[in-house]
Amino acid sequence: MMNAAFLVGKSLDHDRAEIGAALADTIPSAERTLLIELVADAFVDGYTSGCRDGTHEELVRWIDRMCEAHADTPAIATFFGNACGWLDGYLAPRGYDNAFRTPLRSLERPIRKVLAKPRRTTRPIQEQLDEIDAAINGMLVRLEGADPLTAEHSRAVAAWCSRLARRLTLSDEEVTFVSRCGMIHDIGKVTTPKEILHAPRQLTDDEWVFMRDHTTAGERIVQKDKNLIAFAPMVRSHHERLDGRGYPDKLTAPDLPLATRIVTVADCFNAMIGRRPYRPPMSPTRALEQLDVNVGKQFDADVVAAMHDVVRQGDRGVAG
Ligand SMILES: [Fe+2]
Ligand SMILES: [Fe+2]
């Protein structure tokens, strides 16, 4: 049932991007990673949806899955332990209806219960990484079966993501994370009809509806695998734009974490320089011009600048 507070007064739904970013800002810089930023964003989204639906059971289940998947990253549990208190402190002086704040109090107990569950925290890091890699490889095998061109595109996007992340001086761990984002961003295309994926022409409006669905379909696929759940928000959002004209949620700049911005630039650049059934490949110079034209509207300026550097350098000294 739609909560009445969504219809009147200050809307949490409207402000969730700003709140997610502010929540991420509370995390000490030593613990603040791309993963935590995504988690903060997704927490505010999940809380907002729960207020809308009148239940936060799904949010609690998601927190449980995140804690299980990231048992060896204590910062995740610390974040969830503090999130409700912080959110209440943020909403209280800003005139939000009590309907948005009351659920926070009833959420604290189930979250505490989730955090108190014993987790397997002693697995060697390499074992966890292997599990994520195995899960991603499994996704790529699926994609390869459904559409080899999309699988090839995904590998190329992963390589661009990796180069961009290094150029942006992210840590080794973050370079790996962003590269994996590139690898599975289009996994939802396993559900897209082949005649649409391979249409030798521009798509019709009706066909675009199916094509756009690969974002939400991808999110559903990734969410089912505990090793990949952290990638779900990026898979859903990789066609969003900074100016709010993307899909599926028309998110705006504050709601688009750096990992997603990197994937978006790598994805569009690779699509432009690649072959399409209805047009010849664009030269890298022309593709960079297209990125430039859309800086601030579709693309992040720093990421586009990094793409210029990466293309100029070629592969010299840059690990793929
Ligand atoms: Fe896509
Ligand atoms: Fe793509």
Image (cartoon, helix red, strand yellow):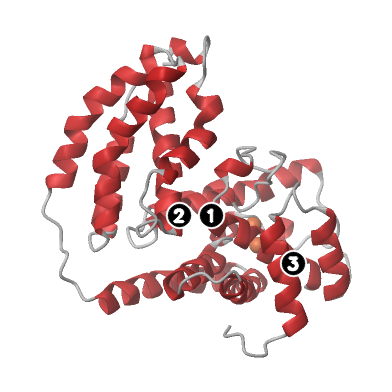
Q: Answer whether residue 241 is visible to the viewer in this image.
A: yes
Indicate the secondary structure of the residue bearing disc 3: helix
- Does any portion of residue 277 appear in the rendered image? no
Of residue 93 and residue 267, the one placed in the foreground of this image is 93
Which amino acid, mark 3?
Phe
Residue at x 61%, y 74% (from the top left corner): 167
Judging from the image, what secondary structure is the residue with disc 2 in? helix
Between disc 3 and disc 1, whose residue precedes?
1
Kindly indicate the quadrant of the structure image that contains residue 105. top left
Dots 1, 2 in contact, CB < 8 A: yes
Residue under numbered circle 2: 221
Q: Is residue 237 left or right of residue 28?
A: right
Residue 269 bears which disc, if any? 3
For the N terminus, give its image quadrant. Answer: top left
- Can you give x and y, in whole percent of width and height, for residue 298 in the image? 73, 50
Q: Is residue 77 left or right of residue 220?
A: left
Mark carried by residue 235? 1
Q: Position of residue 212 (x, y in %)?
A: 66, 47
